[in-house]
Structures are given as structure tokens and as C-alpha cells.
Amino acid sequence: MIHRLQALLYVLLALALCWLGKHAYAFFHPHERVDHELTAKDNVAFALPMGAYFLGILIALGAPLGAPSQGSLLEDLVFTFAWGLSALVVLNVASRLSDKTLLRGFDASAEILERRNLSAGYLRAGAQLANGLLILGAFSGNGGLLPCVVFWVYGQVWLALAGLALPYILGCDLADQVRKDNQAVAVAAAGGLVAVGNVLRLALTGDFTGWTPAVASVTGYAAVGLAFLFIIRELVDWLLLPKVTMRHELLGQKVPNVGVGYLMAVFYVGTSILVGWCL
């Protein structure tokens, strides 16, 4: 009974943080009217990244919930709430940063708010989830605030590199395809971002044991994660789509094949999970 009550309190705390997160998002994105876009305009392109943003908040809460107890239930709740408020700020800063690094070459807000571009929505949703995973990894374990902040920044660098690599992995101008609302490409790219975010989470999770081993570990994991994005694309082409190519399905048809884009996203994310189990 006590454990069920504790679980209920943490769920209520998480919902309270999501409510605060909605207002934090409005503060950091003053030109995006959350309620108006979700209800008055029924803007699905806006709902996609907002849902991922809330999921990112819940994912990031795994860090304080997995930490040692502070001594009592009340102290644990206060610690989790305070940590959650900090995570809201970091997640929103990361969201603004991602618009400049991961969503380069097009105005994501304009595409989502004015054109209701689902491709832009998918891509921003992938960035939100990747950032939530990155925060979970960077702020997990013991070692102090400085290593957490430093490795969160380092993780952002690797996430930006993934954003640069994705057009080459997918074989297209990603920004141009988003402007054309090519949802097949956008779904695959979003899956790639989530996969890289998950690999970085795995790399960053754990206690801080020193700068050299920590940097080496994160760098190794991140490099392996990016390499697997290239490898998985080729394997899916070879094993699962032997009579066609992924490029043709995503780019060479009048109506791009969203199903193949979804398949690519699933294999990207699934491979990132396997990497965590194996390394």
C-alpha cells in the first residue's frame, strides 16, 4: 500500500511538472501559442513535437527517480521536483538550440505554425525526444554538477554532428525534403535522431570517474552510434528491401513511401537499444 501511494505521488508530481513544462515552453517560445495551436487550430504538426516534449520531460525524470534516496519520501519528492524544474529549463534551451543545429536550412516554427507541415513536426519531435534522452544520461549518476553540464554540452555537439550526417546517410537535402513535406524522409530522420540520443544517453549514464575515461567512453559510444546509422541503412536495403532501394522509396516516387521511412526509424531506434545491450 505504501509503495502504491509513493507511486501515485510521483505520478502526480510528474503531471505537475508537465503542466509547468507547458508554461515554460510558452515562455521560451513566445510566438507559439500552445492552446491555440492544439485546440483552436487542431494543428497536428504542432501536436507532434509538443507530445514529444512532454515525453522528454517524463524521460528526463528518470535521472532523479533512479538516484539514491535523500532520506525520506518528502525529501525525495522535493529533490525530484527541484531537479524537474531544472530539467524544464535545460530541455527548453536544448529545444531552441536544436532549431538552429538539427533543423537547419528551414524555419521549423513557420513550417509547423503556418504550413502545418507534418514533416517539420516529425523532425522536431525526434529532436525533442533525443534531447530528453540526452538530459537523462548527462544528469544521471554521481559526480557533481560541473561534469553533468560539461557532458550535456558535449552530447549536444555529437547530436549536432548527427544532424549534419543525416542528409548524407539518407542521401538527400533534408531541409529541402522537409519543405516539400516529404514525411517518409522526415520519419526516418526523426528515428535517426532518437537513436543517436539513446546512444548518447547510454554513453553518459553512470558515475563520473574522471575526465579522460568519461570523454573516451562518450566519444566511443557516439562514434559507434553514428556508424550504425550508416550500416543499418545499407542492411535494410540489402536484407529487407532486396528488389528496391530505400532511396527510391523515400525520394524516387511521386508519393514517398512513409511505411519505409517508419521501418527505417524503427530499425534505427532498435539498433540503438541493441548497442546498449552489447557494449
Image: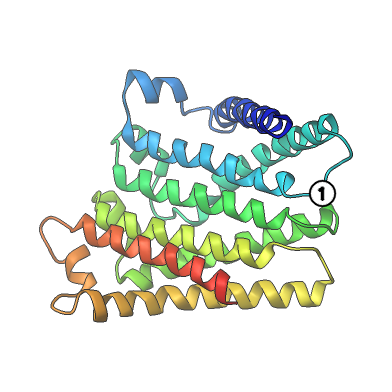
Left-right relation of 247 to 145 = left
Q: Give the class, few, some or many, for how many residues have Cα within 10 Å of label 1's Cα (few <14, many ≥20).
A: few
Res. 203 visible in picture: yes
Examine the rendered structure and indicate whether residue 22 appears above or below residue 273. Answer: above
Q: Image quadrant for the C terminus?
A: bottom right
- Viewer-proximal residue among 267 and 169: 267
Residue at figure coordinates x 31%, y 25% from the top left = 42
Q: Report the amino acid beneath label 1.
A: Pro
Mark 1 highlights which residue? 68
* Residue 185 at x, y percent in the picture: 29, 59
Q: Image quadrant for the N terminus?
A: top right
* Color encoding of the figure: rainbow
Examine the rendered structure and indicate whether residue 271 appears above or below residue 15. Answer: below
Residue 146 figure quarter: bottom right
Examine the rendered structure and indicate whether residue 20 appears above or below residue 110. Answer: above
Question: Furthest-right residue in view?
Answer: 71
Residue at figure coordinates x 83%, y 44% from the top left = 69
For label 1, the SS is: loop
